Amino acid sequence: MPHKLIRKLEHFTRLAPDDRAALDALAQHRQRVYRARETIINEGDKPEVINLFLDGWACRYKDLENGKRQIMSIFVPGDICDLNIFILKYMDHSIAALTPVTVLEISRDAFERAIARCPRVMQALWWDTLVTVAVQREWTMNVGQRDARERISHLICELYTRLDCVGLVTDSACLFPLTQSELGEATGLTPVSVNRVLQDLRRSNLIQLHDSRLRILDLPGLQQAAMFNPNYLHLDQEGSHLAANA
């Protein structure tokens, strides 16, 4: 079941059969299904498991007292949530399903056994954590410096690239279930501004977006519109010196 995680980690470094087996063994643990819009963990709760997303989309967010929400990251299949979660006494943010979601709940003991047997798995997961931090920096740049068209284009490029690296893009198309409100909460824009940008991207023949299905018609053009450089995702085996055959 963790094959999407394995596929993603192998963009960082090549894993040995024992490494893949250790990750596959995690699938023996409990799976849990959440409904769309259901909370996975609330701010203030004590974290008890590491969540590996097997299916569906989720988000990390914070609420203000006036009801406004800021989405701070998007989780797609293959993403693992907060390896260091056990050092927290309580959550300082919330995580919720955006669509129906299936997660694998990994206990601390199971996780520590896996990485003790296979140190290369831990190295690959460190790499994944570093990429998560790099994505957060890019989201800060997105909200702080890019205009509305660039923000939406950049987020689309990033999510499309992340989905492609775990095998969820076919013929330049993928599921894209984010609503205009959710796109706005992730980019600091109103739904009206998001709608205006999406219409512009359609008219420019850069994307098709209908019924939660995205097709990229001109990826170089969309990347140019977004000023998107995928180097922060580190998907070209920069950790090859850690590889199984290194």
Image (cartoon, grey):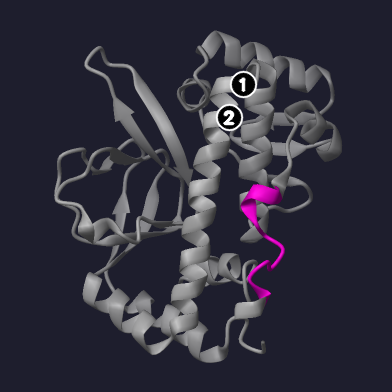
Is residue 233 found inside the magenta-colored segment of the image?
Answer: yes
Direction front: furthest residue: 241
Query: Which of these two is toward me, 91 or 162?
Result: 91
Q: Measuring 59% from the left and 35% from the top, which residue is drawn there?
A: 212
In the depicted structure, whether residue 51 falls above or below residue 229: below
What is the spatial separation of the Cα atoms under label 1 and label 2, in whole angstroms?
Answer: 6 Å
Amino acid at dot 1: Gln
Magenta span of residues = 231-240
The reply to whether dot 1 and dot 2 touch (C-beta < 8 Å) is yes
| Magenta residue check for 73 | no
Residue toward you, 178 or 212: 178
- Compared with 57, 145 (above or below) is above
| Residue lying at 61% horizontally and 34% vertically, measured from the top left | 155
What secondary structure predominates along the stretch shown in magenta? loop
Q: Determine the residue positioned at 30% across, 61% down.
A: 50
For label 2, the SS is helix
Image position, residue 224 (x, y; %): 81, 31
Q: Residue at x 49, y 85 (%)?
A: 19
From the image, tell me which residue sits under label 2: 141
Judge left or right: residue 143 versus residue 72: right
Residue 21, percent from left and from top: 47, 86
Three-letter amino acid code of the residue under disc 2 = Met
Residue 79 at x, y percent in the picture: 47, 57
Q: Quadrant of residue 205?
A: top right
The quarter of the picture where the N terminus appears is bottom left
Residue 145 badge = 1
